[in-house]
Image (cartoon, rainbow, N blue to C red):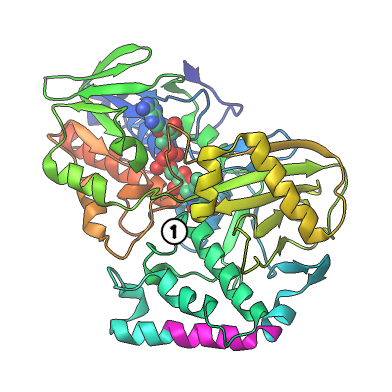
Amino acid sequence: MKHSGNYTKNSWGFHPSKSSREKQLPSVLVLGAGIAGVVAARILHDTGFDVTVLEARTRLGGRIWTIDDFGVPVDMGASWIHGTKGNPLTRWCESLGIHLKRFPVKMPYFFERGQGIGFFRIARKAHRGLTKFILQYFRLLLRCNSPTRSLRNTDYSISDIFDPLIHDLSLPALDRRMILWLRSLQEAINGAPASKVAMSELEIPNLFSLYTVPFTGFARLIEDAVSGLNVILNCEVEKVIWKREKVEVLTSKGSFKADAVIVTFPVGVLRSRRLIFEPPLPEEKIRAIESIPYGDNAVLDKVAIRYESPLCPANWEQFARLPELKNDSTLFTLWTNMQSLTGVPVYVGYFAGTDGAYIDCNYREVSILNEAMEKLKNMLNQDLPDVLSWKVTRWLSDPWTLGSYSFESTESTELDRIELSRPVAKKLYFAGEATHPEHYGTVHGALLSGQEAAVALHRHHCCDHFSSPAAPWMR
Ligand SMILES: Cc1cc2nc3c(=O)[nH]c(=O)nc-3n(C[C@H](O)[C@H](O)[C@H](O)COP(=O)(O)OP(=O)(O)OC[C@H]3O[C@@H](n4cnc5c(N)ncnc54)[C@H](O)[C@@H]3O)c2cc1C
């Protein structure tokens, strides 16, 4: 199926160079139609390769999933552009005229017994705990004897900063609950258990508002990259036979052959028994796949609910609840108010970490919705308006993701990511967020990995140079 997308023009400007036009260029199968796959496919297609994309889902985008169920775009996977400066996504959005909004610009409001309290007011009340938190952070940092930016493979995890304070009975309960909330936020940001995430990954977002959101949702970029490409949806890859003259890929829709393939599957899928490489991948590659932290009994998931009327003032961009110290979970401790972006009362709640993983794997979607609404009701201390529609993600149970994204643990090194990205026998190329040594776990990391795989394949098979202008972010 040729994908025309809804847009007649795309923002790509590759012109195959004369030598590529004259040569019979090799055929390439791109496995997976997430951002890494469609970027790699677009670059190779536009430089003259014969490209086919095989995708298991009935939709494009993978962990980019913009839904339109509420009459406004809502991203159920990636939603933020992390760091706008120098980020290829910023340039790409600009080239398509997509408005980027800094969001959120304010810290969240906290609901305590139905009362909305500003972040700084509650932070002032919890100042003893927060001061201890900062001291604890620097104490561990000094022990690491290394500047923050280069902290890797530290002995310390994010739990090592938070857990002693959560259990510190000399602190008031409110302070300990605040620390527990910050810990749950770290699990959500990393999609991973705090006990595994390296201390270097600690992130206190919002303070400097470094994030932006594309108004149309991320799917518009996928549409742009994919227009005119040959994409086969609903086509699950089961086996890759790669040591013959042509690589053969066996799928739920039959067998495909090509000179090379680019594999862009998430680490969870590469590890699973559903996908077979014949012969098996080289040992170093298997070790890298096993070593890159991913899933690990934790997740980042979302529930989006459209209510008939607003739950709070439109300018409260995010609101939160402090988890109780006993008999409570760390589920739904943060909500994004989409009304402040779209004008429509849609609220996105996050369930993450090990508590999130449990309900992802064991609850039905409607039970997850009920759990979310129960927490909302208790937070606001009021009956909720009617629900008009809703959506729940379960990225950990999803057979084509099996987790949310890779993270950096106390034991991992960037060498595993470099190893995973290394081509095998000029036939197998690897891309995807987990292969990027610096920007793993992000859309732009996945994009850059797709670009790098395409360039490597181009060099090996064509010995040619791209002629400019090229991808929208390279101009
Ligand atoms: C809840 C959540 C929130 C996030 N928030 C952000 C954010 O705000 N900002 C940010 O930058 N990043 C965010 N991310 C991360 C970002 O979404 C990913 O890093 C990025 O989209 C990954 O792209 P990819 O192409 O590497 O992988 P994917 O998008 O997963 O693409 C891989 C594709 O392969 C397909 N596939 C898998 N197995 C098979 C098979 N056997 N046969 C055929 N096809 C198969 C999948 O269906 C998928 O389409 C978030 C992710 C999640 C889950």
Q: Nearer the viewer, residue 84 or 400?
A: 400
Q: Residue at x 81, y 47 (%)?
A: 345
Number of numbered discs: 1
- Residue 333 placement, left or right of 295: right
Q: Is residue 426 magenta?
A: no
Q: Quadrant of ligand 1?
A: top left
- Residue 429 placement, left or right of 59: left
Residue 465 image point, x, y percent: 24, 41
Q: Nearer the viewer, residue 96 or 390?
A: 390
**SS at mark 1?**
loop
Q: Does 297 sit above or below residue 156? A: above
Q: Residue at x 65, y 55 (%)?
A: 332
Q: Residue at x 59, y 51 (%)?
A: 351
Amino acid type of the residue tagged 1 in the rendering = Pro
Q: Is mark 1 within 8 Å of ligand 1?
A: no
Residue 43 image point, x, y percent: 36, 36
Q: Which residues are magenta?
A: 125-137
Q: Does 162 sit above or below residue 372? A: below
Q: Residue at x 76, y 35 (%)?
A: 389
Residue 302 image point, x, y percent: 61, 46
- Residue 282 placement, left or right of 185: left
Q: Quadrant of residue 192?
A: bottom left
Q: Does 98 sit above or below residue 256? A: below
Would residue 10 be visible to someone looking at this image? no
Residue 408 image point, x, y percent: 35, 60
Would residue 210 be visible to someone looking at this image? yes
Q: Quadrant of residue 36?
A: top left
Q: Nearer the viewer, residue 258 or 323?
A: 323
Q: Nearer the viewer, residue 446 or 239?
A: 239
Q: Which residue is denoted by mark 1 in the rendering?
A: 193
**Magenta stretch secondary structure, dominant:** helix
Q: Residue furthest front?
A: 327
